[in-house]
Amino acid sequence: MDLIFGIGEPRDQRVDFIRDLGKRYASDPLLQDLRLVPFHPLPETKFHDQPPMDFDAVSNLIFSLKESFPSHPISIPTHLFSRYPELFSYGLNDLGSLPDSTQDPIMPAFPVPSFAAVKTRLLERNIFLFERLSVLTAAGIQRRAIAVAVNACHRRLKRRDTQSLDFIDNHQCFVCGTQNSNGLKLSFTKHSKDTCISEWIGDPRFQGYAGILHGGLVATLVDEAMAHCLISAGMRVVTAEISVRYLQPTPLGVSLTILGTVIESKRRIHLTKGSVRLSDGTILAEAEGKYSEY
């Protein structure tokens, strides 16, 4: 169901209209989704002298739609409202169809962003975009006329889901991500040409046994250091293999030095070593890693 707002209707009647729709159609088994379409006052339109809908007006409508249709996908055209990522906190939970190949023949002045561009903008807010079927309700899926198409779409989506993932840095990495409020936010610097270094102090949130840093986090730290010695050289890598030798328990509450060094490179495969140490040089854990460029 497309809902066009901003065509001259009184602003105070919009929410009442949505609530009335909810009472009538929220339980309709054939209603698949709702799309809010903000009207744009183009020169050739009747209301060309009116301003476009502002963010407060649109966010209020999204919130009202979510209240009245709590179980339905609610979307907005990405090319008609550029602040769509901010609307997810108000109840937006879908983006409907994205005609990034055909563009919008009705509104050609508004270019449709690519799937990758939309996905990247959403990842910046830790929102993950994936493809869904256009038919969602049980009443719709059970219709014989569309059963063949639905099954074909299921197979296509399954193939797409099993394809290689996109590696997008949205600054949410648990170890080094600057935008992850629950992360460690480590910062690595060059120690030498092939070595990078960081320092960190663990607290009781990360313990295994009392007073001791969890071994899994020790491995995470040294993995990050070995990856960053390659990332700092301009390479984009993922971990292929890692082995860790725990030499001594790693204490909490003291400054730890985490090192990573490039040992050998063969085309797109890079061998590294790393360590976690105390400030006096005592080695607590050593590691070797293999990283692959992508």
Image: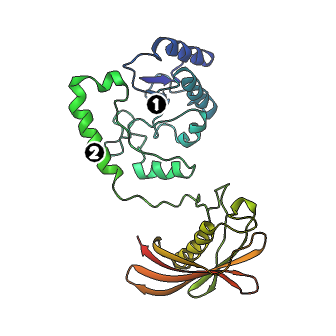
Q: Which residue is mark 1?
A: 73
Q: Residue at x 40, y 48 (%)?
A: 115
Q: Is residue 17 visible?
A: yes
What's the distance in space between the residues labelled 2 and 1, CA to CA?
21 Å
The quarter of the image holding the N terminus is: top left
Residue 206 spot, x, y in % from top left: 69, 62
> CB of mark 2 within 8 Å of CB of mark 1?
no
Q: Is residue 237 left or right of residue 282?
A: left
- Based on the displayed image, in which of its 4 quarters is residue 28 positioned? top left
Q: Residue at x 70, y 63 (%)?
A: 207
Q: Amino acid at mark 2?
A: Arg
86 relative to 139, above or below: below
| Disc 1 element | loop
Viewer-closest of 90 and 39? 90
Looking at the picture, how far across and down is residue 241, in whole percent?
Answer: 45, 74
In the picture of the structure, the residue carrying the numbered disc 2 is 156
Q: Is residue 55 above or below residue 186?
A: above
261 above or below 24? below
